[in-house]
Image (spheres, coloured by chain):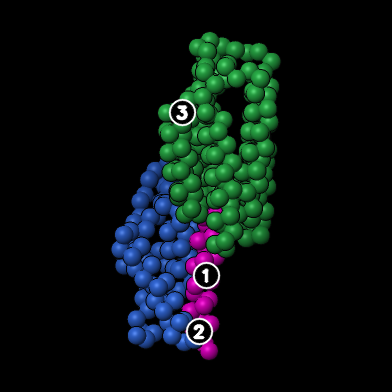
């Protein structure tokens, strides 16, 4: 029927434009799950490293501790971040290509800025805590600032990102009441939440 | 319910595109919209004017140095009308099936 195709086409146009204009940051199903698994893997490795020096990393010391263990953990953290960035960039570029637009368009750059600003501030704060030896506060501040970054990016992306943002922020705040359990909360926030988000996204599409 | 219930303001593809983009992106400028929709300046301007006349869009002109930068936002009225339009399309489709 002619009318039917017309309506269908209108809806298709709407969907295509929404996706094309909004989905620059494509933390979709698969990438969400992969990033979650990456976080869990690296948390596991960190736990393995920390295991034998429990007192230091579960209580905080109040002074700088740049020993071998700290450097190893810092390296692990940076490597994880790098891999996560590469993964999400790869998926974003792939999604952008398949929808036939550039990832360097104006809205995409807006999004990148909105996401990176809170994240960078959180990074600086985390490094400060590390420098001060207040390792307790690293996990909560990473979670809270990551949540804020997602929140600030959410309007350029899929709606679901808002819920993930709220969840990360709340978890980060909750973590403040369980200092010393940072790694556990970190694994939940960066591992489990991403995996849940990924599966929810896969089911929807 | 019949075809006449469909909002005339959304009859064109370009207008649907503009509204869709602005539902997702709170604010967009002229060039980004043009790039996204792949149409000419004149074409985009005329459709934007039509949507603005319906009070579906909010136009904001700013100066960046000596250049004007015009950004567009969707109004509450526009958002409501657009969502109703989508619902209406879906309803009509259901009826046809």
Q: Position of residue A23 (x, y in %)?
A: 55, 54
Q: Residue at x 46, y 34 (%)?
A: A172
Q: Distance between the Cα atoms at labels 2 and 1?
A: 14 Å
Real-space CA distance between mark 1 and mark 3, rounded to the nearest whole angstrom: 49 Å
Label 2 Cα crowd, 10 Å radius (few <14 / some 14-19 / many 20+): some
Q: Earlier in the sequence, mark 2 or mark 3?
A: 2
Examine the rendering and report whether any part of residue A189 can be seen: yes
Span of residues in magenta: A1-23
User: Which mark is nearer the camera, 2 or 1?
Assistant: 2
Q: Chain of mark 3?
A: A
- What secondary structure is marked by label 2? helix
Q: Is residue A5 magenta?
A: yes
**Tag 3 secondary structure:** helix
The residue lying at 54 percent from left, 45 percent from top is A193
Of labels 2 and 1, earlier in sequence is: 2
Q: Secondary structure at mark 1?
A: helix
Per the image, the residue denoted by label 3 is: A178
Residue A72, picture quadrant: top right
**Residue at the disc numbered 2:** A4
Chain A tint as drawn: green
Nearer the observer: mark 2 or 3; the answer is 3
What is the residue that sits farthest to the top in this orientation?
A63
Visual hue assigned to chain B:
blue
**What subunit carries mark 1?**
A
Give the number of the mark in front: 1 or 3: 3
Task: State if disc 3 and disc 2 touch (CB < 8 Å).
Answer: no
- The image's mark for residue A13 is 1
State yes or no: discs 1 and 3 in contact (Cβ < 8 Å).
no
The quadrant of the picture occupied by the C terminus of chain A is bottom right
Q: Position of residue A167 (x, y in %)?
A: 46, 43
Asked if residue A41 lies left or right of residue B49, the reply is right
Label 2, label 3: how many angstroms apart (C-alpha)?
A: 57 Å
């Amino acid at each position: 029927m002619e009318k039917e195709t017309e309506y269908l086409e209108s809806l298709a146009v709407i969907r295509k434009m929404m996706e094309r204009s909004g989905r620059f940051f494509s933390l979709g199903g698969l990438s969400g799950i992969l990033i979650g698994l990456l976080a869990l893997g690296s948390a596991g490795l960190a736990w393995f490293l920390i295991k034998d020096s429990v007192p230091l990393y579960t209580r905080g010391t109040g002074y700088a501790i740049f020993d071998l263990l700290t450097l190893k953990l810092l390296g692990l953290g940076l490597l994880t971040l790098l891999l996560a960035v590469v993964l999400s960039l790869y998926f974003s570029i792939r999604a952008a290509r398949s929808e036939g637009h550039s990832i360097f368009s104006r809205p995409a750059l807006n999004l990148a800025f909105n996401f990176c600003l809170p994240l960078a501030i959180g990074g600086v704060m985390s490094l400060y805590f590390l420098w001060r030896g207040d390792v307790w506060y690293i996990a909560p501040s990473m979670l809270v600032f990551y949540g804020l970054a997602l929140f600030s990016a959410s309007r350029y992306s899929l709606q679901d990102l808002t819920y993930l943002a709220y969840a990360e922020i709340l978890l980060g705040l909750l973590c403040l009441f369980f200092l010393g359990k940072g790694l556990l909360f970190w694994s939940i926030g960066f591992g489990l939440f991403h995996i849940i988000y990924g599966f929810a996204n896969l089911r929807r599409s | 319910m019949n075809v006449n219930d469909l909002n005339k303001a959304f009859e064109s593809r370009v207008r649907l595109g503009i509204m869709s983009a602005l539902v997702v992106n709170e604010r967009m400028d002229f060039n980004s919209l043009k790039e996204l929709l792949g149409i000419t300046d004149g074409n985009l301007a005329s459709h934007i004017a039509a949507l603005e006349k319906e009070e579906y869009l909010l136009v904001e002109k700013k100066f960046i140095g000596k250049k004007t930068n015009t950004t567009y936002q969707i109004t509450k009225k526009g958002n409501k009308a657009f969502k109703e339009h989508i619902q209406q399309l879906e309803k009509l489709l259901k009826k046809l099936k």
